[in-house]
Image (cartoon, rainbow, N blue to C red):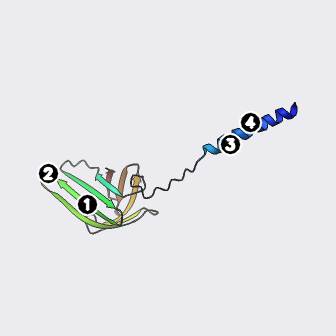
Amino acid sequence: MKEKIKHLMMLLMVMTLSFGMTSCSDDDDDDDDDPSTSSSIIGKWIENSSDDEETLLVEFIPGGVGNVTLESESETFTQRFEYQYQADVRHLVIIGSFLEDSYTVVIVSSTLRLVDSDGSYYEFQRI
């Protein structure tokens, strides 16, 4: 009788442990190419600004190119630019537009902040 109870207890323990093991999964998501992730600058961004007269839009396209558009009531101005982004150190260099500069990148949720060496910054929301 003791032997049967011992076997039953061992069977229950094995079943319990197997359920625990199968419920675990790999939590490492390799989605660096997904533009909707918080660590990617790829995509379209609109500046957070209290200025109702002008809207600044930035688009980072894979391959190191992008567009910056300044919209006002009377006109729309778009420039193409090149960029180099080192995600591991959050360093961005924009070349060939009025945003041309070197920036530290801070991304929190859907907010992108580009901070230049003087400490001034642009802040955008993902659209």
Amino acid type indicated by mark 3: Ser
**Gap between marks 3 and 4, in whole Å?**
10 Å
Pointer 2 local density, CA inside 10 Å: few below 14, some 14–19, many at least 20: few
Q: Are marks 3 and 1 in contact (CB under 8 Å)?
A: no
The residue to which callout 3 is attached is 18
Q: In what element is the residue under mark 4?
A: helix
The residue to which callout 4 is attached is 12
Q: Nearer the viewer, mark 4 or mark 1?
A: 4
Quick one: 77 or 18, which is closer to the camera? 18
Mark closer to the chain start, 4 or 1: 4
**Gap between marks 1 and 2, in whole Å?**
17 Å
- Reply above or below: 48 against 42: above
Amino acid type indicated by mark 2: Glu
Mark closer to the chain start, 1 or 2: 1
Q: Looking at the image, which residue is at 36% across and 58% down?
A: 42
The residue to which callout 1 is attached is 68
Q: Quadrant of residue 86?
A: bottom left
Q: Left or right: where does residue 117 sit relative to residue 97?
A: right
**Gap between marks 2 and 4, in whole Å?**
72 Å
Pointer 3 local density, CA inside 10 Å: few below 14, some 14–19, many at least 20: few
Pointer 4 local density, CA inside 10 Å: few below 14, some 14–19, many at least 20: few
**Residue 9 location, x and y as percent?**
78, 35
Q: Are marks 2 and 4 in contact (CB under 8 Å)?
A: no
